Amino acid sequence: MSEPPKPITLPEVCKEKWLLLAGVIVYGTTAWCSVGHYGTDEHFQILEFANYKLGLTPINDLPWEFPARVRSGLQPMLAYGAIRAADTLGANSPFTQVFLLRLITGLLCLWMYFGWRRHLAESPDSKQTSRRMQWVVEFL
């Protein structure tokens, strides 16, 4: 008797490349087709603070969180840097700049996801770590 044929499976590296390609396509399409913003915080707490740093929004037009200093400055500073870089490269349209911000965010999410996958693959207690971190993936 001969053994039954083994199922054809893609090597893990090939699966990861296809998953990465699918992620880039999904995030790229989403970044391109997105219109507007989901909540007022996305605009008024990040982009308006960045626009203030760029000199495009007067301080009087900023929400109360700015003078109260209750918001983190990390996201507005990242947006400021990305918008400055886009301006330097000639992308002056706010629509193009927001598209680039969304695309960068999607690519960072993919980078973090694949880093997390590699960490789990190398971890001796990956099943236990995976169970502990599953709520994070479901939240994202």
Image: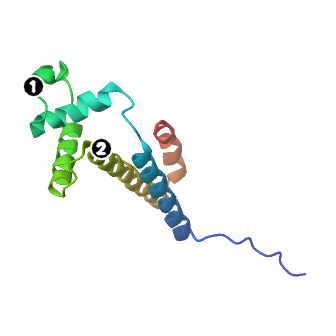
**Would residue 123 be seen by someone viewing this image from the given angle?**
no
Quadrant in which the C terminus is drawn: top left
Identify the mark nearer the N-term, 2 or 1.
Answer: 1
Q: CA distance from mark 2 to mark 1?
A: 23 Å
- Helix, strand or loop at label 1? It is helix
Residue at image position (44%, 50%) is 27
Q: Which residue appears farthest toward the bottom when viewing the image?
A: 2
Q: Position of residue 75 (x, y in %)?
A: 24, 39
Circle 2: residue type:
Phe
Q: How is the image coloured?
A: rainbow
Q: Position of residue 22 (x, y in %)?
A: 51, 58
Front-lying residue, 1 or 72:
72
Q: Position of residue 72 (x, y in %)?
A: 21, 32
Front-lying residue, 116 or 38:
38
In this figure, which residue is indicated by the disc labeled 2?
95
Quarter holding residue 5: bottom right
Circle 1: residue type:
Ile
Residue at image position (51%, 64%) is 16
Left-right relation of 93 to 15: left
Residue at image position (40%, 47%) is 31
Front-lying residue, 36 or 70:
36
Quadrant in which the N terminus is drawn: bottom right
Above/below status of 110 relative to 133: below
Whether label 2 touches label 1, CB < 8 Å: no
In this figure, which residue is indicated by the disc labeled 1?
59
- Helix, strand or loop at label 2? It is helix
Left-right relation of 26 to 6: left
Q: Position of residue 43 (x, y in %)?
A: 28, 31
Pair 2/1: label in front: 2
